[in-house]
Amino acid sequence: MAFNTGLSGLRAASVDLDVTGNNIANASTVGFKSSSAQFGDLYASGFLSSGNNPVGDGVRVQDVKQSFGQGNISFTDNGLDMAINGDGFFVLNNGGEIRYSRAGQFGIDKDGFVTNNQNMRVQGFTADDDGNLSGIRGDLQVETDNLAPRRTTNLRTDLNLDSRESVLENRIRDLGEDLNVADLDGDLFQIEYSDGTTSQLIDIGTGQPANDVAELLGSQKGVNASARTQFDLSEQFDMAQLASDLSDPDFELTISLNGSDNVTFRGSDGINDLDSLAAAINDSELNTLQAQVSDTGDDISITDSRGFTVDMAYTTGSAGSQSFSAPERGNLFVTTEREVTGVLTDPAGTGAFEAAFAAGETRITNEFNPLDQRTYNHATSTTIYDSLGNSHELTQFFVKEPSPGDGVGQSEWSIYMQIDGEMVAGTDETPYTARFNQDGELQSINGDPNGEIVVDDWVPKDANGLPNGADGPPAPGEEVVTPIPDPPTTSAFVVDLSETTQYGSAFGVNDQNQNGYTTGRLSGLDVSDQGVLFARYTNGQSKALGQVALAAFNNTDGLSPVGETTWVETFESGQPIIGAPDTGTLGSIKASSVEDSNVDLSAELVNLIIAQRNYQANAKTIETSDAVTQTIINLR
């Protein structure tokens, strides 16, 4: 019996040595889990009784149990290396057989599948062509094809327009060039302004010179006025008679401006024809008066640059004479600025100025020009893409406008758009109007509370200004629905300005994001903490190729090791619970890392010594038993 007891001890100590040696041998094996031998004593006992003082029959190995405790995580230079931080196993496809492992040393085979060192394929949740995870489990594969281009269908711009900016546009109303001062004789009126105020009562006296009226009007807020008197002598004189009378040495012509400043021109001074008369007028002390002989040589054009009332008369020694039937009065050139909104005629007035204002035309003296920074307050540019992946530059221009109504609680900005130097979205004719409330938040764009602008007239062109073959704008009458459905079929896209604000701070672009991109080549792979495998492309895009699957078991100790640092499912382990990393009880993934063996080398070396002592002690039991037996045999 002692021999059997010693032999069982030798066998147990030998197994302990094997287990400890195996642990030491795999101290540097990635994902390895240490094992320990577990022993139990043996007793011989009958069915009815075990005896009063039973003696043990030795020892047996009950189990070799693995410790699935977490190993240290070490960083590597391989982006596809993965370590599980927490519970779970990688799911591997070994030619149809499913294995489970903690060793995350992965690479890519010739077909693009993610595999371990033994060409077992890593399983995970696959993604569709747009990078959306499908939840369907399969072998993870890295597609090395180029990433196809995607046209821009949405551009979201989040920016702040500086409310402190001034209105740059100079808009005036032109009352025309044929407003003769005589039309305003006796007129009484007031000028209305956008702030609700009016001017003092303006009284245009009968017969007032045009320059005086212009000075009176120009002194009013928001009104600019000048005057000029211009006429031909043929309108007042018989030019044939004048030409004849100029040959008389006693010819004398007198000119008066505003009823004074009389100047006389005499034939005795060398004036004998129209040319000499015009020259004399230009050289006279009447420095506001200019005379020019017509191309036909039979008339003189007279201009007074200040709008004085001009009167003329002449006499000759032979009793020849002519005089103006009525003095020539000047024309007024009047413009009003944006703040002037109307004219109120006094009941005693003629209403001539009010009629001229109503008939006037509004014009902008500094219209928006994308090449002139003085005509817009802010601008921002971004790159968009057509259906072929060609890049184009979209620029948005913002021009502050006067506040609508009485200017309380609302602000307005005009928006212009340009792609590659050509105006789009119809803003070459009419800009979009963005309206903001008293809190600086966007209320609407052209009345649309969604704050969207649909660009549906863009024709993508090449560097020579010719269509480049990409999709063009929708057909006439075709409605553009927003958001634009996928896949898009035209060049139409939406500019989303819903997050735009107008605060009293500097202009700034907080975010500008569009969903298009050009063609891209695979440049690298990344793995997230959730095990999502991302492909990086040369165009700056990334796309999810799949997500690593992890498996957990109700009884991890029931797994059966089959070598290659892998385990297989058994009846004792139960069926696997497969899910995404970092969900439920499953651990997270650490990319570019591996989980080291959890073998404690110091403890294993101590266990080695203990196993050796146990083996020697059991051998001594056999040796002693042999000596006792030999003594009995030697009895005679």
Image (cartoon, grey):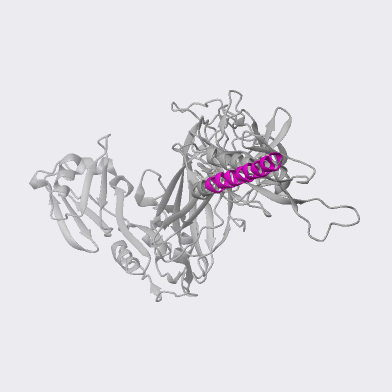
Q: Nearer the viewer, residue 56 or 172?
A: 56
> From what the image shows, is residue 220 above or below residue 604?
below
> What kind of secondary structure does the magenta stretch mostly adopt?
helix
Q: Position of residue 58 (x, y in %)?
A: 71, 48
Res. 578 in view = no
**Above or below — where is 261 with respect to 61?**
below
Q: Which of the two residues, 451 or 241, is positioned nearer the viewer here?
A: 451
Point out residue 228 in the picture as x, y percentages from the top left corner.
Answer: 30, 55
Task: Pick the residue in front: 5 or 193.
Answer: 5
In the rendered structure, which segment of residues is drawn in magenta? Answer: 608-634
Q: Is residue 308 left or right of residue 262?
A: right
Say which residue appears at 39% left-offset and 53% top-offset.
177
542 relative to 191 in the view: left or right: right
Residue depicted at x 71% and y 39%? 633
Instruction: Identify the residue at the far front of this view.
Output: 636
Residue 488 lies in quadrant = top right
Q: Residue at x 34, y 61 (%)?
A: 225
Q: Quadrant of the N terminus?
A: top right
Q: Is residue 624 magenta?
A: yes
Question: In this view, which residue lies farthest toward the right?
Answer: 48
| Residue 71 in view, yes or no | yes
Q: Quadrant of the C terminus?
A: top right
